[in-house]
Amino acid sequence: MKNITSSFQKKEAGNIEIIYTIPVNLIIQTKTTVVSEMAKDMTLPGFRKGMAPLSKVESSISIDKLNEHILSHLLPKAFAESVKEHKFNPAIYPKFEAMKIGQGSDWEIKAITCELPKVVLGNYKKNIKSKTTDELIKELPEVIKLEIPKLLVDEEVNERLSQLLARIEKLGLQLEGYLRSVGKTVETLREEYQKQSKDAISLELILNEVANDEKVEVSETEIEDFVKTTGSEISKINDDQKKMLQRVVMRRKALEKLTKKV
């Protein structure tokens, strides 16, 4: 049986495009697996749970839902193999777009992701003029220029907009009314968030590299102390959260070191 094939292309600003061709025989095989799995939890008229014939189960599932499940079985593994084959480090999980999906033929799926830019610090200590932490936060992205992929910026912008909408809804307000009250439009707000998002991502990447350059280390005690400032307890923090907090503390220490040296 044929395997999934792909074409890999690096685009501008760190964006990456991968086109997957999924052979029809693999689609049929995967569909059988998907229907069998879904049948276990389905109850159809005249049949006990999980006992309906697969043909009836398949006919009860919408084409879109079935295709979605087929792709969810195939694409994660295909993408992982692409990362290994082409030796790149994706900044975000890809967005998949169906280019060609039809019965009796191969499928074509486009994956779009991006890589983080390489940070070159140069003689950053000499070039920085800021004397305070706030000034340094603003200056670093200007001194050390990075080309941040638009895909990454857009994702951050959308996250900020979602958080804003959630806060507005809690106050019982509508977005249009809120924007009028602050003298902004959706377009100007998005532009503002794009600048903020780009600078925030740049700052994070720069401080990560500064931390490496300065050989910054973070102790367990420092992580515990930081967790306490959030009102939580270290025992309630899982390993992934702990790693994230470790990086946050590391960047803070890098910023402190930098502030003392300029």
Image: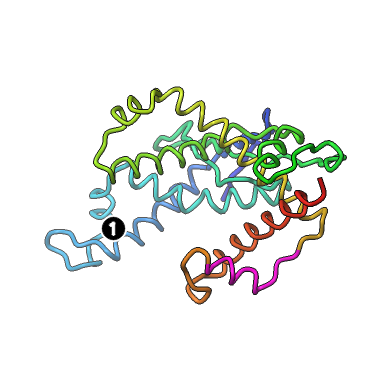
Label total for image: 1
Q: Which residue corresponds to the image point at 56% horizontal and 37% vertical from the top-left?
A: 197
The vertical placement of 26 against 245, above or below, is above
* Quarter of the view holding residue 127: top right
* Residue 214 shows in this picture: yes
| Residue 13 place in picture, x, y as percent | 68, 30
Height in image: 22 above or below 36?
Answer: above
Task: Residue 89 in the image: state x and y as whole percent.
Answer: 68, 48
The foreground one among 162 and 10 is 162
> Horizontal and vertical percent for residue 185?
39, 23
Q: Residue furthest bottom?
A: 235
Q: Quadrant of the C terminus?
A: top right
In magenta, the rendered stretch is: 217-228
The secondary structure that most of the magenta stretch takes on is helix
Query: Mark 1 — residue?
Result: 54
Foreground of the two, 155 or 187? 187
